[in-house]
Image (tube, helix red, strand yellow):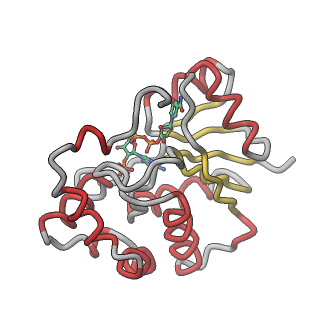
Amino acid sequence: MVKRGLLIGRYQPFHYGHLYVVKQVLSEVDELIIGVGSAQVSHTLENPFTAGERILMISKALVEEGIPSSCYLIIPIPDIWNNALWVSHVCALTPPFHVVYTGNPLAHRLFKEAGFDVRAPPPYDRAKFSGTEVRKRMLEGGDWKSLVPPAVAKVIEEIGGVERLKDISKSDKLSYLEPRSSPP
Ligand code: NAP
């Protein structure tokens, strides 16, 4: 039987830490589903990139790394406003999987309660490689490119990602730019 894993994250943006985790998890499973979480959210300080842009970053980075495309699927997963139904929602959008890797405590809890084998992603240098740090350096004019694979930096440059983040940060109504905790 094919052993298929689900790795879920927001990938805002996809950085070297995520790439390390993908490679480690691929050594444990035959096929990997990379779930792009909060797929409906973009253009906020925490979530600047669209699901399509994040899928492009991940696919280009994995091609650049020489990882065969037959090993993985990248699937956008929008949030829903009902945690008790979230695991069913994820399962409805993805092929069957046997093991879940997540760094999000709520996602960990929900999959565990649903009876899945849930594992923490393999550790990497989180102090250095984090989405928060990449976005911070983008805003402050720091060296963000050294934290992401070259293919990701290229996508971010092509879409004007740094300028987008800087424009978003100029708003004085930041609370309205973050995801809602309930539907409109
Ligand atoms: P998060 O809570 O933002 O991230 C948790 C931590 O794990 C961060 O430090 C993050 O680092 C790290 N991380 C994320 N992806 C990783 C990966 N693949 N490997 C290693 N570390 C990783 O949440 P998230 O894990 O990025 O995403 C969970 C998704 O599940 C979110 O989109 C959330 O909305 C969704 N969710 C939805 C519901 C619902 O709709 N009801 C319920 C539960 C969860 P970085 O910041 O560097 O990525």
Query: In the displayed structure, would residue 32 be above or below residue 141?
Result: above
Query: In the displayed structure, would residue 103 be above or below residue 140?
Result: above
| x and y, in percent, of residue 147 in the image | 30, 68
Figure label count: 0
| x and y, in percent, of residue 12 in the image | 39, 56
**Residue occupying image coordinates x 44% and y 58%:** 18
**Residue occupying image coordinates x 55% and y 22%:** 83
Q: Nearer the viewer, residue 44 or 148?
A: 44
Q: Nearer the viewer, residue 56 or 95?
A: 56
Q: Residue furthest front?
A: 184
| x and y, in percent, of residue 122 in the image | 46, 47
User: Which quarter of the figure has residue 78?
Assistant: top right
Query: In the displayed structure, would residue 45 be above or below residue 113?
Result: below
**Residue occupying image coordinates x 21% and y 64%:** 166
Q: Is residue 36 left or right of residue 29?
A: left
Q: Is residue 146 left or right of residue 62?
A: left
Q: Nearer the viewer, residue 73 or 12?
A: 12
Query: In the displayed structure, would residue 20 be above or below residue 62?
Result: above
**Residue occupying image coordinates x 26% and y 63%:** 165
Q: Is residue 162 left or right of residue 140?
A: right
| x and y, in percent, of residue 98 in the image | 73, 38
Q: Residue furthest right?
A: 1
Q: Is residue 23 left or right of residue 1?
A: left
Quarter, ligand 1: top left
Q: Nearer the viewer, residue 173 or 94?
A: 173
User: Which quarter of the figure has residue 180?
Assistant: top left
